[in-house]
Amino acid sequence: MTEDVTVVVATRNRRARLLETLARHEAPVIVVDNGSDDGTPEAVSNAFPGVRVVRLGRNAGAGAARNVGVELAGTPFVAFADDDSYWAPGALAEAVRVLRAHPGTGLIAGQVRVGREGRLDPVSAEMARSPLGTRPGAPGPSVLGFPACAVVLRRAAVRQVGGFTERLGTYGEEALLAMDLAAAGWQLAYVEDVVAHHLPLPAGRNRDERHRIEARNRVLTAALRRPTGVVLRAAADALRNPAGRRGLLDAGRALGWVVRHRRRLPDEVEAALRLLERDVAAEPAPVAAAVSAGN
């Protein structure tokens, strides 16, 4: 058991898969339930009496659930996991070692292995060859995004920047937190020796609804932190399909909120984002799509 890190799992209505993955984490676990109606909280409490279960009573979104877990964690480091993911043996101990050895690093994104066969996630392959290189004092290639099921963070860093922006809910909420951590001066690095396994279910969530929310969040994230040209490109991308157009309308309804919370990134962070975007644009379409979705 690794005592210096807490695993925070946000969940909603995935009782069977959560019960399968929970036992694999080698650290204390906090499960934050987003209003499940399938008996998830009771099942977890009965099967894992040592796991702390927090019931939000409504679907507040993954970002809000993780923020609750971060606040409740009593450890210097926090690892996120989804209800369909788990940390490989030794991964969390290695993450703690890396973060203690690199005090300027606020976040490490681990390698993701997908499915029972453990195939490498394209996002991980892309992070390993990040065009940003490895900064002095960093434990691996610099990144400016992360899959939430495979990230370990310094709790103080997350709290410093206010955690996830809860209005973004679920899907694509990671991008803004990554930008804010970088803007605050923290290093974000990919560390391939820290491994997470992702066991996505073959069916479940409404894909059209997910695409709508992802489009909304891409536009809102750009509007909150990026130059006008980037915002316009995100809006143009959203117009390409019906779900994206609905997401763009949703983003437009939040204009007043955006104006109140807009804060431009430091020049060096914006320049790094542009470099990453050019690199992704040069990839074959399937790889670029996977990387965009993962970040």
Image (cartoon, rainbow, N blue to C red):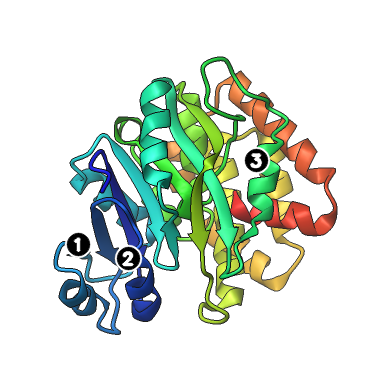
* Element class at badge 1: loop
* Element class at badge 2: helix
For the question of whether residue 60 can be seen, the reply is: no
C-alpha gap between disc 1 and disc 3: 32 Å
Q: Mark on residue 127?
A: 3
Which label's residue is closer to the chain start, 1 or 3? 1
Q: Is residue 212 above or below residue 154?
A: below
Residue on which the image places disc 2: 22
Residue drawn at (43%, 22%), measured in percent from left and top? 102
Is label 3 or label 2 in front?
Answer: 2
Which label's residue is closer to the chain start, 3 or 2? 2
Under mark 2, the amino acid is Leu
* Element class at badge 3: helix
Under mark 3, the amino acid is Met
Asked if the residues shown at circle 2 and circle 1 are in contact, with their CB atoms under 8 angstroms apart, the answer is: yes
Residue on which the image places disc 1: 51
Q: Quadrant of residue 230?
A: top right
